[in-house]
Amino acid sequence: MESLARAATGLILAAATVAAPVQLNGTFALLGGTQRIVARAIVSHPRPNEVTFDIKQTSQQGGIVRSYQIDMTKLMHLVVISDDFRQFSHEHPSYNRKSGTFRQTITVDPSHAYIVYADSTPKSAGQQVFRFSIPASANPSATMAPLPPSTPSPDAVTAGPYAVKLGTTTLAARTAQMIPLEITKAGAAAMDLEPYLGAAGHAVFVNTATLEYVHVHPMVRSTMSTTSPMSSGSMDMDQPQSGPVAGPHLMMHVPPLPVGTYKLWFQFRGAGSLEVASFTLAVR
Ligand SMILES: [Cu+2]
């Protein structure tokens, strides 16, 4: 009975926190970027395990931003991570042209806080990324779990039927660098990869202390590469005509990162399935 009563109290608390929508101001979070617009979100909880965002972006003077470049086939990318960095999702909000509002509902674990990144490219402003912090909606879990330390020579990370291996998980700070990334399936180079949102894969880096964000797209290499090529714009320049267009050998151009511990989520498409491999990087 006692646990029932406690559960009931929890429900009432959850119900109480579900009601009122709140407005949040977005914090500019693009590493190396320059803030040119302002983002606000109205956050509501239709259910204890759901959060709805209505994001409105305006100029510094308050005019609604209505003109966006399509980036990777979408107007806005919403990257959602939990406060312990264990959950990751990548959504594409619907856009209401009339009100200039992006809307997305996400499913959450009510005992976790979440960080939401709104990544868009308004015309004439360049890439703009804002983060919003969503408190736990019920009975917050005590503290953020500490991140396991980075291993200098990583084992491959499992993602569905695939294994993803990074060339290194220890990076030099404040230095642009190329990091190879290999995707295997059942011990051999994966040959059934497909592009996702116009790229071979999507890599999101988040500094776990400052919560700064970077989003990069690796280039495809025709063979496993041990040397760092010069930066090249074309994703498939080394690609044989008939080969796969989304891997399995990739090269990731990582911009200069300040010292810190970073989470990296690498999202890619396998044969009909969307996969994500997560890494912890030490930048020294
Ligand atoms: Cu991307």
Image: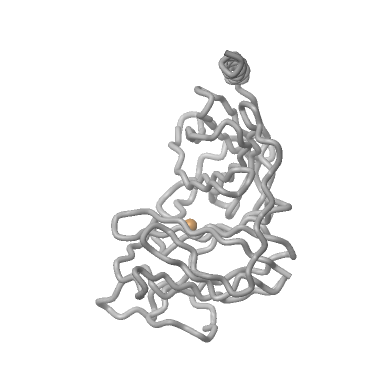
Total tally of numbered discs in the picture: 0
Closer to us: 247 or 98 = 247
- Quadrant in the picture for residue 239: bottom left
Q: Please provide percent x and percent y for residue 110.
A: 57, 31
Q: x, y (%) of residue 267? A: 45, 57
- The single residue placed furthest to the bottom in the displayed view is 227
- The N terminus appears in which quarter of the rendering? top right
Determine the residue positioned at 73% across, 52% down: 210
Q: Is residue 193 above or below residue 241?
A: above
Q: Nearer the viewer, residue 206 or 75?
A: 206
User: Residue 170's x, y, as percent?
Assistant: 65, 72
Name the residue at 73% across, 53% down. Answer: 209
Which of the 4 image quarters holds residue 152?
bottom right
User: Can you see residue 20?
Assistant: no
**Furthest residue in direction left, as rendered:** 242
Q: Is residue 134 left or right of residue 99?
A: right
Please state the horizontal and vertical placement of residue 211, each as a whole percent of the image: 68, 51
